Amino acid sequence: MEEAGVIDWSSAESHVLLSPRMPAEERERLERAVPPMRGHVFVATSGTTGDVKLVALSKDAILASAAAVNARLGARREDVWCCVLPPFHVGGLGIHARAFLSGARVITMSWDPHAFARTEASLASLVPAQVHDLVRLGLRPANLRLILVGGGAFDASTAPGWPVLASYGMSECGSTVAVEDVLLSHLEARTDDDGRLAFRGASLFSGYVYIDGAFVDPKVGGWFVSEDLGSVDGRVVHVRGRTGEFVKIGGESVDLGRLDRILREIAGDAAAIVAVPDERLGHVIHLASTIEASAIVEAFNARVTPYERIRGVHRVAEVPRSPLGKLLRSVILSRIDGEGA
């Protein structure tokens, strides 16, 4: 396991950054799958299939994104970044790259809103849930001149008068893509025929590394077609949501299809996963079950990451499905709406 803060950005050495909470067998298989590519950083992500894979980002690509963010924020040597995002995520990785280019210092800490509010940092990247914590507790950091908020939909009106800038990004683009809906200078954007956003530019990834060792570069003519739906008007990008069944939980992208497969192995067709809107985290995972669920919850939670764990249980008469067997998640949500966990 490696830390983003110890990466030599000017070397040809490559690095694999994985969550320490990832199951050991999965982590070992991913590490063995890494190809002999020079000057790359590999971070984990999940695609439309829900299978974990690695995003291969060259150091030059990450630094291209970092340079564009620094220019947009007016970041300088005198700034101090506070990094509360995990180093195995492009959000945390990007902070260290920005500081490397500007010569700024980085304070790294686990998330504690009270400790964060006392830091001497002038710049920070947070997810919406962390901003929600600060606002709820009335902890406005005195030294911060800008907070870049990403990892999910964010309404700046929830933090009135705060120096917050909503951002949009993804691993495949080396971190931040747009700030306040305006595309950063190093990227181009367009939409494809089905409304998916596509990007081209210096910060794009080299390709995906799959757990079986396969390497795939999905770009065509330099363009990467994302799983995000939206529109592009000049340099303005509007994001409407994601294809498939992805939701954001505390800034993390979660594939419900992957969770479905885990649950089916445990409970067959007797239960279903739903993502319930949550003011702080964006969504939380609930279980709808036709049978007693304590053993199901225990087994499921043991196989997923902490933010994917079941936080509410609902007893239902049936798990509704279409004539073709597709889970009708929206029907379940409508039936449990207003219930307590």
Image (spheres, rainbow, N blue to C red):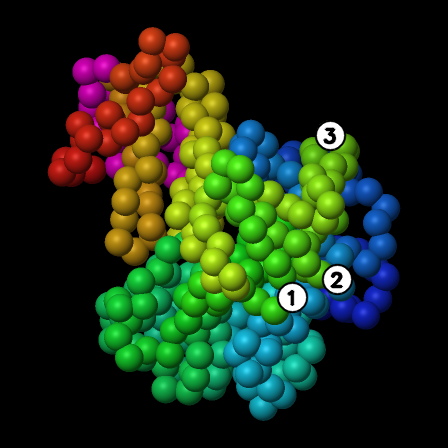
Q: Which mark is residue 320?
A: none
Choose between 135 and 176: the one closer to the eye.
176
For marks 2 and 3 on the same chain, the one whose residue lies earlier in the sequence: 2
x and y percent of residue 280 in the render? 30, 56
Q: Which residue is mark 3?
A: 212
Q: Which mark is residue 186?
A: 1
**In terms of image quadrants, where is residue 159?**
bottom left
Q: Is residue 3 visible?
A: no
The magenta stretch is: 292-318
Q: Amino acid at mark 1?
A: His
Disc 2 vs disc 3: Cβ atoms closer than 8 Å? no
- Marks 2 and 1, Cα distance to the nearest angstrom? 15 Å
Choose between 104 and 109: the one closer to the eye.
104
Choose between 199 and 116: the one closer to the eye.
199
**Residue drawn at (28%, 79%) of the image:** 161
Question: Is 89 within the magenta?
Answer: no
Question: Is 300 within the magenta?
Answer: yes
- Please say if 248 is above or below 84: above
Q: Which residue is mark 2?
A: 59
Choose between 285 and 101: the one closer to the eye.
101
For this view, does 326 lie left or right of residue 98? left
Q: Amino acid at mark 2?
A: Lys
**Residue drawn at (61%, 69%) of the image:** 185
What SS does tag 1 mark?
A: loop
For this view, does 247 lie left or right of residue 83? left
